[in-house]
Image (cartoon, coloured by chain):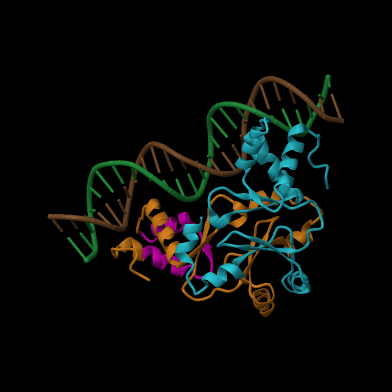
Chain colours: A orange, B cyan, C green, D brown
Amino acid sequence: MESQSGYKTKQKELIEQCAAKMGASHFTADEICEMLDTCGTHVGKATVYRHLERMLAEGAVRKYSIDGKSGACYQYAGGAACEHFHLKCTLCGKLIHAQCSFLDRLSSHVEYEHNFKIDGSRTVFYGVCGECAGVDISGKPACRCKAHL
Amino acid sequence: MESQSGYKTKQKELIEQCAAKMGASHFTADEICEMLDTCGTHVGKATVYRHLERMLAEGAVRKYSIDGKSGACYQYAGGAACEHFHLKCTLCGKLIHAQCSFLDRLSSHVEYEHNFKIDGSRTVFYGVCGECAGVDISGKPACRCKAHL
DNA sequence: TTGCGTGCAAAGGTTTTGCATGGCA
DNA sequence: TGCCATGCAAAACCTTTGCACGCAA
């Protein structure tokens, strides 16, 4: 479960440490690159992609894309369960991490009543966050969405 | 809620019909293009993208991407009143429509406790359906995911 | 007639691929 | 020493944007 990568190289270790350090946050391949650059260690972009792809196959990270936006997001899977859900505001683009017992119960409910095992780390709830709703939920957020990203 | 599109053009109608004809299946912008080409009616790719984007804003279609694969998938949302949630199996790709009081309560809960208004028609729960789970849910779908897509 | 919608092509960004080099075993 | 991993650059890919023309109103 650890030897698929063949050789144990410096880059491999660096990338894995970097991913692990992100915890529950998500990150892009490019961010990993920048992060390593900042640490004084440069790693080729292609190498980062190759390792993330491998880690994905190994189950060490999860991959999904927010809103189909170009630029996939990865998230460290850390072996253990990161069982919170994500709320994505379709107006301002903000991503909220939500964790509470009700959402936990949702998983159980769907699993036993609907015979479906939800993968929390891949599931994103789309909707409108409180801020945007307060400011303007009348139909046209327009400007600020773009501005935020 | 229907007049954002301004003029009623032939292309607009064609694209909407095409999307509606897909029913619950998913399709890419490119597939719409090809489909129209096959029907003898050519529509520019940019136009398809522009209309899908607009239909997305209107809620007429849903947009999501399978596993971050390049190429976003769209799905016809069937105009109105589709207030149930969708369960998408990441192994076999099946899409399940789920409706029950628990899921309704989920919306209320998230709205009042997390200050977030979920848009049910845009939200998709990713996970593993019972059938696929029966085959292999032992912990590592890994390899077969790849194989299936 | 006015102005939006369309189509083509080019730009934009992310991800993948090819190939020579360097490092692990 | 052999072979895999790396890095650079170019390619491939999907999507968006700019601009001139055509069509709906």
Q: In which quadrant of the rendered image does the N terminus of chain A lie?
A: bottom left
Report the magenta stretch's main SS: helix
In percent of width and height, residue B21 lies at: 73, 45
The span picked out in magenta is A14-40
Q: Is residue B47 left or right of residue A18?
A: right
Count of picture labels: 0
Residue A117, quarter of the rendered image: bottom right
Snapshot quadrant of residue B97: bottom right
Foreground of the two, A123 or A73: A123
Q: Residue at x 45, y 69 (%)?
A: A21
In the displayed structure, would residue B112 be above or below residue C10? below
- Image coordinates of residue A127 in percent, x first then y, are 72, 61
In the figure, B106 relative to A131: above or below?
below
Residue A94 visible in the picture: yes
Q: Please give left or right for residue B99 compared with residue D6 in the image.
A: right
Q: At x 67% / y 78%, what residue is drawn?
A: A105
- Measuring 66% from the left and 49% from the top, which residue is drawn there? A146
The residue depicted at 62 percent of the width and 46 percent of the height is B28
- Dividing the picture into quadrants, the one containing residue C23 is bottom left
In the rendered structure, the answer to whether residue A117 lies left or right of residue C20 reads right
Q: Position of residue A85 (x, y in %)?
A: 62, 69
Q: Is residue B55 magenta?
A: no
| Above or below D15: residue B109 | below
Q: Nearer the viewer, residue B61 or A85?
A: B61
Whether residue A142 is visible here, answered yes or no, is no
Q: Position of residue B13 (x, y in %)?
A: 77, 37
Q: Between residues D25 and B72, which one lies in front from this camera angle?
A: B72
